[in-house]
Each structure stands twice: as structure tokens, then as C-alpha cells.
């Protein structure tokens, strides 16, 4: 090749050499381009792998299940809802770790109780901790638990519910709404009447406007006692008493303390007309999105939270009464003759009529009476 080049005339030789040099430079540029492209693809593949691995790790770190839990009461140590929830959440976390994250929404943050019931039904809220009363809006049979003087104590409530009444009512609720009862717990003491002016007898309560839950059992109970029952959502109660929309309300002492209702009332007539169960309910969608292998741990956590909360209830209830006394609430007991008379009136009128209207509850009434003995 070199011999052929140098055998040519000088001018031709220079032209050919310039072409060869240009060709060599072009080859070098093409080679560098190929090298850079190879390095870029290698780097890009590594980056893609790193990103994928990072996303996988992040995905694995995210909880597999998130549950929103609603309560109408404050996140307070005097709140039965919160005491139950705290223990439930601790046990769920201990058993399942990051596989489940619970979000607690107190003080009716997710809406009025009646609205939250509907949201639990359709699945926009997963769980609700509340009194059993509000579920009578979708399963009227639950109203039997709210009939005046149905129970004598929370021990009586637990004996009846654990003895089969709770299972039967839970089945009614599930068949009607698809929702599942996770727990039957207790509030912190029985419900009594709180007012701005003294009410110490059945004659005193006649015509008094009392806030009650929007269920027939509550309304009919206080009609029989002579009051004027006025349904109002719990989150509107404080203002309703403060502004005179109602003269008072009925509730348990611990809730009065936790919700600062002692600021708008001064007297308590210890009617102890209702030992209201507390209930934790999970909706159909909330249960269905729960992997089958974690359901036993959820059920176990609910059972343990119920045992713990029931043990706390009696102590908390008595302590709440003493604290309300210190804060200025005056307590007056309901005399036994009036209690006996009202209870007989409830049994012969309300209980009997309820069993006729909802025949499935007749054996449940019998079971509650048997548990009383």
C-alpha cells in the first residue's frame, strides 16, 4: 500500500494521504460514539435496576392494609371508645407490625354518627366505635338494648351479651348491612339525666327538653318518664345545651367529663336508666380488603381490648362521678319506689310492644331476664 502511494506523483500522493487521514479520523469518531453509547446503556440499565429495587423496597415498606376508625368521643382517657381503641391498636401492632396501619378519627371528625353508620355500610369508613344505640337506625332490633331499665348493671349486660344475645344481634346486623360486630364492650358507667336546673323526681322531669339519640327506644323511654325527648347529634350537644335548645341530656359520667359537658350543666339525677353497650363494628368492604391470614389477629386484638376495657369501665365510671362532683355537678339519686314503678311501666309497655313489633327479639328478652337472675 505504501509503495503504491509513494510511486505516484507528489500532488496525487498528497491528495491520497489527506483522504486516508480523514478516513482514519472518521473511524476514530465512530469508534468513540459506539463506546460512549455502550457505556450510556450500561449506566442506564444499572440506574433502572437501582430504581426498580428502590421502588420495590419502598413498596414492601408500605403497610398492606390501612383502616380508618371513627369515634364520636374525644381521644381522652375518660373516653371508653379511646381506651378500647388504644388497647386494640397496641395488640394489632404487636401481632402484625407494619402490615396494618390504623387511623383514629375522634370527635366526629368523619361526620355525625348516623352518617358514619352509612359510610361504614358502603365502605368509605372501615370501622366505627360507638354506642350500640346508633346501629338501631339500620337494624331496629338493636333498639331493645336501649329500652329503659333493661339492664341492672354492666355485669348483667356482659352476661347476657356473652351468653348469646350479642351473637344473635350481630347476625341480624350482618344479614341486614353486611357489617360485622368485632366487640361488645362497656361504657364508663350507666346513663343518667344531666340538666341546667335541678331535676330530682319524675314530677320534676315532666316537660323537660332532653337531648336523646334519634332512635325510637330512647324517644319512647323518655316519653314514658314524662320528659320531652329531642334528638340531636352528639357533636351538636354542647352548643344545644349552652344556647337553650334543650334543657339537658342523658349520658354516662365519663363522657360528660371527657366532652366537658359539665360546663353547660349543673345537676345530675341518677336515674341509671341505661347500661348502654359499647360496640366496635367493621364494614363489609373493610373486612373484605383484609387478607385472610391477618383476620384472626384482628379478632384476637378486639377480644383482648374488650376484656381490658370492661375491667377499666367500673373504675373509670366511679372516678368520673367523683371528678364531676369536684367540678361542681350536684348529684341526686333516684329513689327506689320511683325506679321500681318506672321499670314496671317500661316492662309492661315498651318491652312487650317491642317484642311484638320485632318477634325475633322475644327470645332475646327472655335471655336477658334469665341473665338477671
Image (spheres, rainbow, N blue to C red):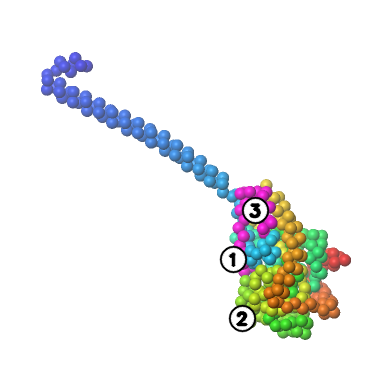
Q: Residue 109 got which mark?
A: 1
Residue matched to label 3: 288
* Left or right of 203 on screen, residue 57: left
Q: Can residue 6 be seen in this view?
A: yes
- Looking at the image, tell me whether mark 1 or mark 3 is earlier in sequence order: 1
At x 72% / y 69%, what residue is drawn?
A: 320
Image quarter in which the N terminus is found: top left
221 part of magenta stretch: no
Image quarter in which the C terminus is found: bottom right
Quarter of the image holding residue 139? bottom right
Mark 3 or 2: in front is: 2
Q: Where's residue 250, x and y in %?
A: 71, 75
Q: How far apart are marks 1 and 2 (CA)?
A: 23 Å
At x 16% / y 17%, what residue is drawn?
A: 6
Q: Give the range drawn in magenta.
A: 85-113
At x 67% / y 78%, what residue is drawn?
A: 265
Mark 1 or 2: in front is: 2
Query: Relative to residue 287, is residue 73 depicted above or below?
Result: below
73 vs 123, nearest the viewer: 73
Quarter of the image holding residue 138? bottom right
* Left or right of 49 on screen, residue 358: right
- Looking at the image, tell me whether mark 3 or mark 2 is earlier in sequence order: 2
Residue matched to label 2: 243
- Disc 1, SS: loop
125 vs 183, nearest the viewer: 183
Q: Distance between the residues labelled 1 and 3?
A: 24 Å
Q: Where's residue 326, x and y in %?
A: 70, 74
101 part of magenta stretch: yes
Asked whether the beta carbons under mark 3 and mark 2 sit within 8 Å of each other, the answer is no
Mark 1 or 3: in front is: 1
- Disc 3, SS: helix
Amino acid at each position: 500500500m505504501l509503495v503504491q502511494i509513494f510511486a505516484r506523483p507528489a500532488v496525487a500522493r498528497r491528495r491520497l494521504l489527506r483522504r486516508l487521514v480523514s478516513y482514519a479520523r472518521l473511524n476514530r469518531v465512530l469508534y468513540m460514539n459506539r463506546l460512549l453509547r455502550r457505556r450510556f446503556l450500561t449506566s442506564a440499565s444499572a440506574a433502572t435496576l437501582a430504581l426498580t429495587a428502590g421502588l420495590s423496597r419502598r413498596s414492601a415498606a408500605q403497610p398492606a392494609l390501612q383502616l380508618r376508625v371513627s369515634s364520636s368521643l374525644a381521644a381522652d382517657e375518660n373516653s371508653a371508645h379511646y381506651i378500647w381503641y388504644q388497647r386494640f391498636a397496641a395488640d394489632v401492632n404487636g401481632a402484625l407490625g407494619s402490615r396494618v396501619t390504623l387511623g383514629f378519627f375522634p370527635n366526629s371528625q368523619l361526620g355525625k354518627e348516623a352518617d358514619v353508620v352509612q359510610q361504614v355500610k358502603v365502605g368509605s369508613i372501615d370501622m366505627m366505635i360507638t354506642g350500640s344505640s346508633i346501629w338501631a337506625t339500620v337494624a331496629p332490633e338493636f333498639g331493645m338494648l336501649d329500652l329503659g331499665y333493661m339492664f341492672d348493671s354492666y355485669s348483667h349486660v356482659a352476661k347476657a351479651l356473652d351468653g348469646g344475645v350479642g351473637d344473635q344481634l350481630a347476625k341480624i346486623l350482618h344479614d341486614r348491612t353486611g357489617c360485622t360486630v368485632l366487640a361488645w364492650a362497656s361504657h364508663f358507667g350507666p346513663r343518667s339525666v344531666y340538666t341546667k336546673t335541678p331535676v330530682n323526681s319524675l314530677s320534676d322531669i315532666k316537660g323537660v327538653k332532653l337531648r336523646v339519640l334519634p332512635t325510637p327506644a330512647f324517644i319512647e323511654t323518655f316519653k314514658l318518664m314524662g320528659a320531652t325527648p329531642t334528638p340531636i347529634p352528639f357533636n351538636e350537644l354542647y352548643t344545644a345545651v349552652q344556647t337553650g335548645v334543650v334543657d339537658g341530656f342523658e349520658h354516662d359520667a365519663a363522657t360528660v367529663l371527657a366532652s366537658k359537658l359539665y360546663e353547660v350543666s349543673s345537676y345530675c339525677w341518677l336515674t341509671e336508666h341505661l347500661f348502654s353497650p359499647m360496640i366496635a363494628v367493621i364494614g363489609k368492604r373493610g373486612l373484605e380488603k383484609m387478607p385472610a391470614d391477618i383476620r384472626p389477629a384482628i379478632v384476637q386484638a378486639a377480644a383482648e381490648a374488650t376484656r381490658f376495657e370492661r375491667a377499666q369501665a367500673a373504675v373509670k365510671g366511679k372516678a368520673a362521678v367523683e371528678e364531676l362532683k369536684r367540678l361542681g355537678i350536684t348529684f341526686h339519686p333516684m329513689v327506689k319506689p320511683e325506679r321500681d314503678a318506672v321499670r314496671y311501666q317500661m316492662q309492661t309497655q315498651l318491652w312487650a310492644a317491642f317484642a311484638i313489633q320485632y318477634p325475633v327479639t322475644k327470645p332475646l328478652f327472655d335471655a336477658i331476664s334469665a341473665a338477671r337472675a
